[in-house]
Amino acid sequence: MGNIVYREPTVDDAEEIVAFYNRVGGETTYLSFEKDEYPLDVEGSRASIKDTAKSPNNYMLLALDDNRIIGIGTISSSWKIKSRHCGELGIVVENAHQGQGIGSEIIRRLIEWCRGNGITTRIQLDTRCDNELAVKLYQKFGFQIEGRLPNTTLLDGKYYDLYVMGLMLEEM
Ligand SMILES: CC(C)(COP(=O)(O)OP(=O)(O)OC[C@H]1O[C@@H](n2cnc3c(N)ncnc32)[C@H](O)[C@@H]1OP(=O)(O)O)[C@@H](O)C(=O)NCCC(=O)NCCS
């Protein structure tokens, strides 16, 4: 395995980003979308990359191994005045590259970016309560469990709860 490179996407990455999300959607049940259920097509992804680059409180970070996308982290925020300080964190690392510190590095960089953008003071996310590895990973960075949304995931006839987790940047 070569060195992992972390960088923001350009529009030329759109096709691989969509393929990556559609693929990893089938690798885990912990993502909100299934295989081939990623909501954007390549055109949509191109537009989103452009919008994100222009936005002060939206961010996407790619992790690449040998020029191939192996992980993606995102911060998604509203433009609304009362809630634009809240950034929703999303992260996925492909199965073959998990457990190598890449997820931790992506989160570290997302938090650093939020601290520097002049707007974000709170990072939030939701994660399945049984995704113990992810919950522990977020707690390592100071995220707290703030609430529990019962029965919000329905998978193979079984209901699962989501934790709402949050990190206030001002307090740290
Ligand atoms: C959650 C996720 C992003 C973590 O990425 P990662 O690259 O594996 O993270 P890291 O390598 O930094 O590992 C994080 C911690 O989990 C531990 N870990 C990772 N994989 C593990 C495994 N297979 N078995 C045991 N521990 C493991 C690491 O030791 C590390 O612990 P530490 O912080 O005490 O050192 C990744 O597992 C993933 O994409 N999962 C599927 C999608 C998902 O759940 N996304 C989050 C939805 S909210």
Image (tube, rainbow, N blue to C red):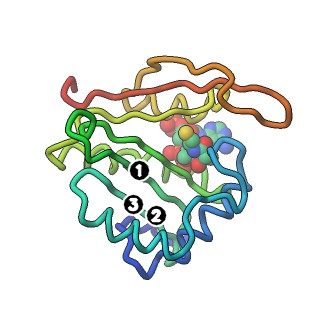
Q: Quadrant of ligand 1?
A: top right
Identify which residue is drawn at 20% across, 39% down.
81
Please rate how many residues cluster around mark 3, counting C-alpha atoms within 10 Å: few if below 14, some from 14 to 19, many from 20. some
Dots 1, 3 in contact, CB < 8 A: no
Name the mark on residue 61.
3
Instruction: Give the residue type at disc 1.
Output: Glu
Q: In percent of the image, x 62 and y 31: which residue is there?
A: 128
Residue closest to the far bottom: 12
User: Which residue matches tag 1?
Assistant: 105
Residue farthest toward the left in the current orientation of the protein: 118
Task: Looking at the image, tell me whether mark 1 or mark 2 is earlier in sequence order.
Answer: 2
Q: In which quadrant of the rendered image does the C terminus lie? A: top left
Image coords of residue 126 (percent x, y): 51, 33
| Secondary structure of the residue carrying numbered label 1 | helix
- Identified at 37% across, 76% down, the residue is 10
Query: In terms of sequence position, does the residue under pointer 1 or pointer 3 come before the other?
Result: 3
Residue that carries the numbered disc 2 in the rendered image: 63
| Depicted 36 relative to depicted 66: above or below | above
Residue type marked 3: Leu
Q: Is residue 161 above or below residue 58?
A: above
- Residue drawn at x 35%, y 45% is 108
Compared with residue 160, is residue 70 higher up or lower down, i.e. above or below? below
- Residue 117 shows in the view: yes
Q: Is residue 136 left or right of residue 107?
A: right
Label 2 residue SS: strand
User: CB of mark 1 within 8 Å of CB of mark 2?
Assistant: yes
Mark 1 CB in 8 Å range of ligand 1? yes
